[in-house]
Image (tube, rainbow, N blue to C red):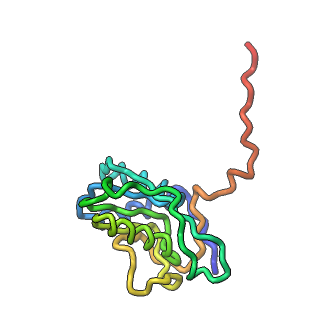
Amino acid sequence: MRQEVLTWQDVDKLIDELLPQMRGSFDSMLMITRGGLVPGGIIAEALDIRHVLTAAVRFPDMEEKMLAWPTFLQFPEDELLRGRRVLIVDDIWGSARTINTVRGRVEAAGAYPHVAVLHYKPAESLFKNKKPEYFAAVTENYIVYPWETHRKTMDTRLIEPMPG
C-alpha cells in the first residue's frame, strides 16, 4: 500500500471539494475524535454550524475484531440529537466500524445522520452496502494527514524568557 502524506494545502483542496456537495442544511455536527476534529472544525466554520458535538469511540484490541463491542468514551445525550439533521465528520472511511457505530447511535437517538469524510476507501470498508453521503476523494493509499505528523516526538519544551 502506497503512503500519501498530505499538506495543509492538500486538506484545503479536499475541503473545497467536499463543501459544494453539502447542499442541505444541518442542525448539528458530530465530530469523531480524533480524526474528525480538524476537518469538522473547518466545515463547521464554512457552513456556519454552531451546534458542534464530539464522539469518542474505542474498540478493544482483539484477535477477532469483528466480535469486539465498542466503548463510547464520549457521546452526546440523546436530547442533544433528537430530531436534528446531524453531519457526522471523520477524516477517513476505512473499515467504517467507528463511523457506522456512531451513525447507528445517532439514528437511535432519533436524529437524521449524514456522514462526511475527506477520504473514502471502499475496498477496506466492512459495510459494502453503505458509504458516506459526502466524500472528497476515493483512495486505496495509506493517508497521513498534517495533524498526524510526529510532533509528539519533537522537543517542544518551552523556552524560558530572557531576563530583562
In this rendering, position of residue 18 left or right of residue 9: left
Name the residue located 57 percent from the left edge and 81 percent from the top edge.
67
Work out whether 125 lies above or below 86. Answer: below
Name the residue located 46 percent from the left edge and 64 percent from the top edge.
90
Q: Position of residue 62 (x, y in %)?
A: 66, 77
Name the residue located 72 percent from the left edge and 41 percent from the top edge.
156
Work out whether 44 lies above or below 116. Answer: above
Q: Position of residue 76 (x, y in %)?
A: 40, 55
In the foreground, 105 or 21: 105
In the foreground, 120 or 28: 28
Name the residue located 60 percent from the left edge and 74 percent from the top edge.
142
Q: Position of residue 29 (x, y in %)?
A: 36, 56
In the foreground, 12 or 67: 67
The quadrant where residue 75 appears = bottom left
Number of marks drawn: 0
In this rendering, position of residue 34 left or right of residue 1: left
